[in-house]
Amino acid sequence: MKIQLSSPDLLDARTDCLVVGVRENAQQPQSTRKIDKATKGLIGSLMRSGDIDGRPGSALMVPSPAGIEAKRLLLVGVGDKPDVDDFANATRAAARQLCSSRSVSAVVALTEIAVSGADPRARARMLSQAIEEAGYRFNQLKSAKGKEAARRECTVKRVTLLGGSTKNDASMRKGVQEARAIAHGMSLAKDLGNLPGNICTPSYLANQAKKLGKSHKLKVNVLDEAKMKALGMGALLSVSRGSREPARLIIMEHQGGSRSDPPVVLVGKGLTFDAGGISLKPAGAMDEMKYDMCGGASVFGAMVAAAELNLKLNVIGIVPSSENLPDGAANKPGDIVTSMAGKTIEILNTDAEGRLILCDALTYAERYKPAAVIDIATLTGACVVALGHPATGLFTPDDDFADELIACGETARDRAWRMPIWDEYQKQLDSPFADMANIGGRTAGAVTAACFLARFTKNMTWAHLDIAGTAWHSGANKGATGRPVPMLVRFLINRAQA
Ligand code: BES
Ligand code: MN
Ligand code: ZN
């Protein structure tokens, strides 16, 4: 999809769809008034008849409007005094309608809508991102070709956003550019997440990383099990022992800063299928455990976006990748393994495997002397119980870092909520036989998982994002969300500018 800014004459724009905003009671936006006049009061009469009412999120597609050149006119409710939420609703409704029409081109005038809390750059970014996201499809594993397959695709190819005053043009262009990179990162993260476990294996992820290395000029290094063994990654390798697919440690580097600048390191859980191991999960919805690599996928997405935006920042992405399956060689409850950091771990539940692969990857991250480390993981069902699906769980002992990340989530509309990680919880991980157990009992499961990771990140500025509730949708709209790519990319952009 190509999104650009320009200011064509709305009345003779030969486009498949012209998109304008409609207010409830206040005076209509300039473009809307212009179109209303040219169509002899069409919009006014549709409002009087109640076909469109101007509430944010409402939308009406009008085919073949007389009096203007556009093939379709899409009226989008924007409310009278829209805030950021209203505008987000409006952009989503517009994008959804646009992508379910058969339009190839579109001219969108919604950039002119004043929004409290969103400058022209943010408005351009939100609009572009909504349109790019609405166009996302995952049909690569459907066999049907031809008409039926074509019907599933979004036909929109060229979108023109109405460019604001020349004063705003440059910043709006920046917004469109950011949105494009974020959307590309999200769509990569979604594709990897949606792929099933029999295709998206640790080796598959490693090969994808190598491809991205070529297409996006990332330095990519993949460690196989022998190399991990030499490094002493006993926790990570213990998880992969029960699987026929060999584990991989994937390392991607974007060198945008000077050589000596300490990098930001992103560590993403890349568990390509989590059956639980010997502590086998129940059968219901187990298919969704193909999404247990979404943390890793978000690292792929953020790396791609960092490269596309040419961020002046050193960024390193690390994805420990393995399966977690039951097998004669698999971890057993009670087994004790030694992590790369030298700490011993009693594995009381083999289903708490994410922290086992992450702790070694976090220890590996130390060698980069990072400015900051963020790990991203579908780590605990308990986090979903605590926060549901709107918010990612954020854990860090560092108040400033917490505030920084929360603000990034707000700006990107990809929010996180801070959870405690006090030492008081650490005793839940006590083990009579090893330095720690890998589970902390029935209560505060998301917190004790974070506390486990905290033991391996003492020397770094570190945050943990539990995305178990935010990485994918279940039910009729099952699919990866691409979260938290928007939040991560916002963080990288801000750090690059700092
Ligand atoms: N990948 C799961 C966490 C998960 C479960 C995410 C369901 C999203 C939905 C993780 O590896 C896991 O199994 N965690 C256990 C930990 C427990 C054994 C302490 C869990 O949450 O049940
Ligand atoms: Mn598990
Ligand atoms: Zn898992």
Image (cartoon, grey):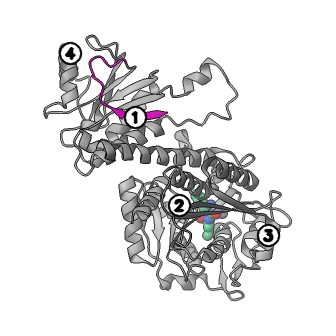
Q: In the rendered structure, which segment of residues is drawn in magenta?
A: 1-14
- Asked whether residue 7 appears in the rendered view, the answer is yes
Dot 2 amino acid type: Gly
Image x and y of residue 101, in percent: 44, 23
Q: Quadrant of ligand 1?
A: bottom right
Q: Residue 256 has which mark? A: 2
Question: How far across and how far down the image is residue 44, in percent?
Answer: 18, 21
Q: Work out whether residue 331 can be spotted.
A: no
Work out how far the residue at label 4 is from the one at label 3, CA to CA, in angstroms. Answer: 70 Å
Overall secondary structure of the magenta section: loop
Residue 48 % position (x, y): 17, 21
Magenta stretch: includes residue 136:
no
Location of the C terminus by quadrant is bottom left
- Judging by the rendered image, the residue that carries numbered circle 3 is 227
Q: Earlier in the sequence, mark 4 or mark 3?
A: 4
Amino acid carrying mark 3 in the image = Lys
Q: Residues within 10 Å of mark 1 (few under 14, many from 20)?
A: some
Q: Are marks 3 and 1 in contact (CB under 8 Å)?
A: no
Q: The residue tagged with tag 1: helix, strand or loop?
A: strand
| Image quadrant assignment for residue 338 | bottom right
Q: Residues within 10 Å of mark 3 (few under 14, many from 20)?
A: few
